[in-house]
Image (cartoon, helix red, strand yellow):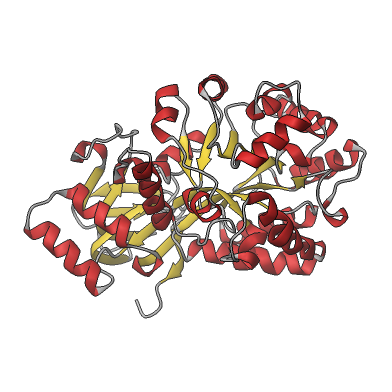
Amino acid sequence: MLALHADLLDFPHAPAWGDTTDAGARFRPGHWLLIGDDGCIQAIQTEPPDAAWPREDHRGCWLLPGFIDSHVHCPQLDVLASHGTALLDWLDRYTFPAELHHADAAHSAAAAARFLDALLAHGTTAAVVFATVHAHSAAALFDGAAARGMRIVTGKVLMDRHAPPGLLDDPDPKVAERECLDLIARHHGRARNTYAVTVRFAPASTPAQLAMAGALCRADPTLVMQTHVAENTDEVRWARELFPQARSYLDIYARAGLLHPRAVLAHGIWLDAEDRALLADTGAHIAHSPGSNLFLGSGLYDWPAALAAGHATSLASDVGGGTHLCALRSAAEAYKVQALRGARLTAWTALHAATAGAADALGLGHEIGRLEPGLMADLSLWDPAATPLAAHRDEVAQRQGQGLHARVFAWMMLGDERNLAATFVAGRALYRRPGG
């Protein structure tokens, strides 16, 4: 049992685009959040609990749901902040060489532990993760997440062409299928693990492999599917050359049976209206990775068009095309992407996409993403005044009566992992700020 006292901030419903009123968020200052022995939120109340409850008083801090990173590559921590190339050259020069090291199971295990601890140190408690083509790389993430109690969605990467030999699946799709089925049997639905059928991207899979991946999804609708789509114009042209029968890049996945309510497609920059309608019709959603899109020069995601079409958008770091694991920084980058398009993203929409919106899009809204009794106590505790500049900005916003959105927006734009005081997973503090 544990009782936390702080200012609670979450997003029970999707905020309206552009709405900066307090109606876009649920803010409960000076509340106690009570965590039961089962790791779930037991109650939220204004009065202190009785003396039987161990208490932590974090007045002045903001308690949010733990962030959900909907698209991130574990092996690419090794290539963070590598000097600039576009997507396809990035893969050949940086990504594939890093992933080749994961042929060593011990390397994969150490990398998974480093990666999961890094997520926690950035306030992220759940993630949809790319491993490598090696089955043990996915197993290492599942085992590491189970040891920490984290919600992780991952799977071995499917890739049988257009990559180095050491990263290719066997030409017989049944070999990779058996590896997937073994991982599903050992990990899917155990602890808090979810298996994701993980197609690297259409150009790296033969039609036979895509068909196999689609069959896995049809056989078990509880599986997630993750892949990349329409990130870069050269990639889009290449996909169309390889799959001339498809109407669009996204249609390649539709024809293979890979679009469904638990499908997560990273990027989705170069989509048209028909593609967006297809996402809405199938329930699939886009994991927006603004830091990566800016760093690689891939393009500017059209978030208002996604809203108009009716499909969801979650927020992701991508790494290593992105340069960090911090959801706050991703939210700030997303604001800049939309500003370049002539739109203005609110803090409410951005933070919803990294919490409740991501949980709902992944079919996990019954478990995580909000501060409500019965949900898991996956939490991130933030100090909005962690630095002198942040403290001054927040004091000005309060003194001038600028309102809650102004305070949260300034924190979102100025903040980063230095503002993180603690991260809780199932009610256990797995990260605390050094010296805090």
The image shows residue 102, relative to residue 201, as above or below, that is below
Q: Nearer the viewer, residue 427 or 404?
A: 404
Which quadrant of the view contains residue 137? bottom right
Residue 246 horizontal side relative to residue 371, left or right:
right
**Residue 82 in view here:** yes
The quarter of the picture where the N terminus appears is bottom left
Which quadrant of the view contains residue 166? bottom right
Give the residue furthest to the bottom. Answer: 435
Give the residue furthest to the left. Answer: 400
Q: Which of 228 and 240 is in front in this view?
A: 240
The image shows residue 384, relative to residue 240, as above or below, that is below
Residue positioned 50% across, 60% down in the render: 325
Q: Give coordinates of residue 283: x percent, y percent.
A: 54, 25
**Residue 367 in view here:** no
The image shows residue 280, relative to residue 2, as above or below, that is above
Q: Give coordinates of residue 55: x percent, y percent.
A: 30, 65
The quarter of the picture where the C terminus appears is bottom left
Residue positioned 46% across, 42% down in the render: 300
Residue positioned 39% across, 73% down in the render: 433
Residue 421 horizontal side relative to residue 199, left or right:
left
Q: Give coordinates of residue 195: x percent, y percent.
A: 68, 42
Residue positioned 47% across, 66% down in the render: 121
Residue 387 horizontal side relative to residue 396, left or right:
right
Count of numbered tags: 0
Residue 295 horizontal side relative to residue 89, left or right:
left
Q: Give coordinates of residue 129: x percent, y percent.
A: 62, 50
